[in-house]
Amino acid sequence: MTHTVEPDVVAGPVSVDVEHLWDRLRLVEDRVRHAVAVRRAAEPDPDDPYRGQYLTPDAVARILDEPGGLGVPAHEPWQPAAGSVLDGLARRFGLSPLDLDLLLVALAPDLDARFERLYGFLNDDLTRRRPTVGLALELCGLPGAASGRFRIAPGAPLVAGGLVEVTEPERPPLSRVLAVPDRVTGHLLRSTRPDARLAGVLGAAREDPTAEEADVRRTAAAAGTGVGLVHLRTRGGDAAGLATAALHAAGLRPLVLDAAALARRAGDVPELARVAALEARLTGAGIVLGPLEALPGEPAERARTLGALCAALRGIPLITHGTVGWAPEWAADTPVALTVAAPSPERQAARWRHALERAADDNSDDGFDHIPGGGSGDGLAIGDVDKLAEAVAAHRLDSGQVRRAADVAVRTAAIAGRPVGPDDLRTAVRAQNGAGLDRLARRVEPGVGWDDLVLPPTTHRRLRELALRARHREQVLGQWGMRPGGGRGRGVIALFAGESGTGKTMSAEVVAADLGMDLYVVDLSTVVDKYVGETEKNLERIFTEASAVNAVLLFDEADAIFGKRSAVKDAHDRHANIESAYLLQRMESFDGIAVLTTNLRANLDEAFTRRLDVVADFPVPDSGQRLALWERCLGGRLPRADDLDLAFCADRFELAGGSIRACAVTAAYLAAEAGSPLTMRQLVTAVAQEYRKLGRLVLEGEFGPYLDAAAAA
């Protein structure tokens, strides 16, 4: 018997354990030779070309006189070499020596094509080129009526484990054919390529290198008890990375199943679960499944999916993870439930250090040596990493997102020929956000900063407080436990109250820019619904998506949905109160960053005020602030005439920042049409138009010597 090994599918060179497999198959070949010789000696004309297609009277008489079997002598039980591929198979699947013999008999045609014709001869049917149950037993020295036949029954390890398939169920038991799945054959030849049927549902195994050792030990110990079912509920931590680290600590390979991909193939889940179970047992792996919230949302469908998975994977370490808790109806077994807390600032900085150094090493061959501390194996300076980690401290990222963001930031900086900066990292982190919230809110990429704001010092301090709360919430609310009990989330919620145009929306954009996040403005048209209960469902979708996205959520004109509860006089009042009560509860458990804006603070329910972390009032700007606003809105590129008197405008026209910006834009259009620098007359004309738009009177006391220009506007 000869054999070849394809190097592209074999882990390393042919090893002693594979040679042991071939040695044992040579013994199978010897037994087949003996069986063929016995059969040929009993045949009157073994070379008859029609053999196997009919029975002569002599053949019938001979069959009746035979006691059964091929006369193959029995052999001594054998054990595979310790540490060999067959030994690992026997241990993981609970196989007996007879099971291994039966497996090798069924495997032979997949390794040597000669066995196909030999088995056809022995089956007395040249079209049946695989061993039947009866032939396999006889080649193992057992009669068909022996108890050994039950080693190929449906519940036996060979069949239940998926190592051998018994085909043609319509035939009598001894005439059914044995086949070995391709993946089992590949594994015995040391292939590491997973079963092709798992394509599209396997995820990347990403270990959290900074996971707490105690958490890893605890999770590994839980996976090694009972049926091996563990559920990690994440509260901002990297559950998937912890699960992978725990399996490695337990000496197991992680096999990651993507819950979202399984949800798309819900009808195939039972078959995929069996294939995954075979893959895990073959390779000595544990299963990581998640996030569970990505599975079908309908309760019965989710229960069917998880039930099928847990049943097929019973006895294999299975670690599930997600933001949801485990429901008892999902499976017959109850998991050990553990909570994965958000990482401390020190651990998050360590994550960034590891990811940036790895990205620097991976890109060192592509011109990365110019980055300070970079280059092959040099890593980045501690101070640099600490500064970069601080720039994205408000973001909640698992280790996979950190790794991808670090790689993008390093490559972006390398292309530009400069060190990795905070802006590179912020941009890369924002790119990790999913598109789920885009369908429910309008995304705004911040383009303004603190210097663009003209606000009273008190309001400015409140905005800074909002940013620092968002940046340090994991330490204060998580590590220090300053918001315990009651199912409270770790979100930060602020209220911006003030008249229209006083800078509320722009301030939210500035805070988002400071945190390195996008701003998502909730479109009330996608939220409010006339049908009872639909508004709450829409809001729940927004809150759920926002919790999974590193962004600032802005509810503009929030009093429309956060209004006061009132006495119940009819069904409409009752429904409105239910909406408000739902929002009160949901804001408590929210884990993200939200900003509510209102023109009329008195319209908000007082219960909302208690749940607010920051309240910032936006008054109408005074004359000094208005002058700064006029200067900023007109900018430095718009040509100005000598008669332009911005101090007069700031002193006389009591306008909010939004109105001043509108006036500046209108005046710029007038100057562009005239083809000359901006004049005072054009600016006053723009102000008069804004007054009329706001429903205000154009009075001489305000416009003074420019009243004629205002009247002509």
Image (cartoon, helix red, strand yellow):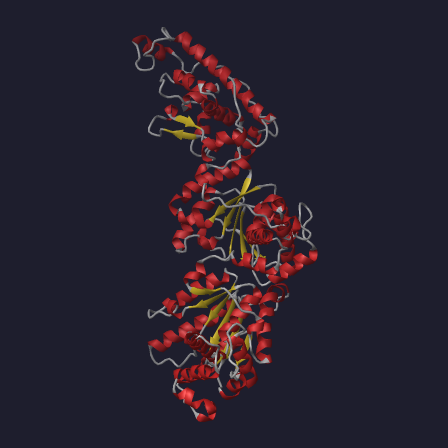
| Between 708 and 482, the one nearer to me in the picture | 708
Answer left or right for 374 relative to 569: right
| Between 557 and 118, the one nearer to me in the picture | 557
| Between 693 and 57, the one nearer to me in the picture | 693
- The part of the image, by quadrant, that contains residue 577 is bottom left
Q: Position of residue 245 (x, y in %)?
A: 60, 47
- The part of the image, by quadrant, that contains residue 85 is top right
Instruction: From this view, report whether residue 663 is shown above or below residue 696.
Output: above
Q: Position of residue 506 (x, y in %)?
A: 51, 72
Q: Position of residue 207 (x, y in %)?
A: 59, 48
| Between 689 and 584, the one nearer to me in the picture | 689
The quadrant of the rendering that contains the C terminus is bottom left
Answer left or right for 52 relative to 112: left
Residue sitting at the far top: 44
- The part of the image, by quadrant, that contains residue 120 is top left
Number of marks present in the image shown? 0
Residue 483 visible in the current orientation = no
Instruction: From this view, report whether residue 520 is shown above or below residue 123.
Output: below
Residue 565 visible in the current orientation = yes
Answer left or right for 349 relative to 282: right
Q: Position of residue 595 (x, y in %)?
A: 50, 71
